[in-house]
Image (tube, rainbow, N blue to C red):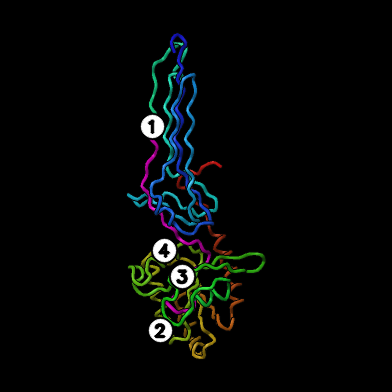
Amino acid sequence: MPKGGPDGGDGGRGGHVVFKATSSLNTLTHFRFQPLLRAEKGQAGMGSNKHGADGEDLLIEVPLGTIVRDFDTGEVVVDLSGEGLEVIIAQGGRGGLGNEYFKSSTNRAPRRTTKGKDGEERLLELELKLLADVGLIGMPNAGKSTLISRISESKPKIADYPFTTLQPNLGVVSLGDYSSCVVADIPGLIPGASEGKGLGLEFLRHVERCELLLHLIDASLPPERGLSDFDAVTHELSAFSPQLAKKHRLAVLTKMDVTESRTHLLKLREGLAARGMEVHAISAVSGLGLDELLGILSQMLKQTRELEHDVVPITQTRNS
């Protein structure tokens, strides 16, 4: 501004790209049709010392349990496992400085300005894992779907052939004293699952989320078969992740309404005890042992949660 001093205001910053975790979504399919996410640009500074407006943040809702990874390095950027958690995934660029910013007592008419900086660009990979307190694991037809249908309102497909469950089912289970937990009926596991056989990795990646595992074993099978099935599942857990194999597990003998199961009970208990497992026997069909199982679940979850520690945030959380 001739003879009037500096007149240029600062530019506004670009908007941030923000992810928000919500339980109202359960898939990532909306990203298939919107792979490029771009927040609003900041406005340029103007004359009369007017600053440009900041760009509006782009808020994207993602399902609770979404893991965000850097596509190139595979590094986890953030694990969005808390309801309502908002995290800045990509920072908006800084606005440029107008000549008004550089005015001083010794430089009354600065001609200096700076350009704004580009916003952050990132190529990200999103993965959704179930959030459940308890995971039901075991070979196909071990009784997982029948159990979750009896202890919750979940209605999974139940049949007498393998792999009737093709995707995890969730059910909310009341534990009494106004407390509850979420139980996941995970698709059956077969030898080689850690290498992708059967439902393979589709099964194992969801188990990582569970605090506690109920390992179901079909007691109507010969004890040697039941124990070998148990060992096979344990091997697949270890092969996929050593930490996964260390999760607290309870061995649950199922189908105790069948005559053969009662004759196999002692040998199965001895074999599982030798493997360091706590054992509980049930019949989801008749209801035998279900109330006791829920009581054990309640106590085990309390113990597990008491051992949990706070996790250090991985990335910046937006102030609400």
Q: Which part of the image, by quadrant, shows the N terminus?
A: top left
Note whether residue 312 is visible: no
Amino acid at pointer 3: Ile
Choose the circle earlier in sequence order: 2 or 1: 1
Residue drawn at (50%, 72%) of the image: 214
Q: Which residues are magenta?
A: 117-143
Residue 78, numbered label: none
Residue 117, numbered label: 1
Mark 2 highlights which residue?
A: 225
| Residues at discs 3 and 4 in contact (Cβ within 8 Å) | no
Q: Position of residue 192 (x, y in %)?
A: 34, 72
Choose the circle earlier in sequence order: 2 or 3: 3
Q: Position of residue 252 (x, y in %)?
A: 51, 77
* Callout 2: SS: helix
Q: Position of residue 142 (x, y in %)?
A: 46, 79
Spatial CA distance of label 1 from label 4 is 39 Å
Give the residue at the far top of this rendering. Answer: 3
Camera-near label (2 vs 3) is: 3
Mark 4 highlights which residue?
A: 205
Choose the circle earlier in sequence order: 3 or 1: 1
Residue drawn at (48%, 40%) of the image: 57
Camera-near label (4 vs 2) is: 4
Magenta stretch, main secondary structure class: loop
Amino acid at pointer 4: Arg
Spatial CA distance of label 2 from label 1 is 65 Å
Q: Which part of the image, by quadrant, shows the C terminus?
A: top right
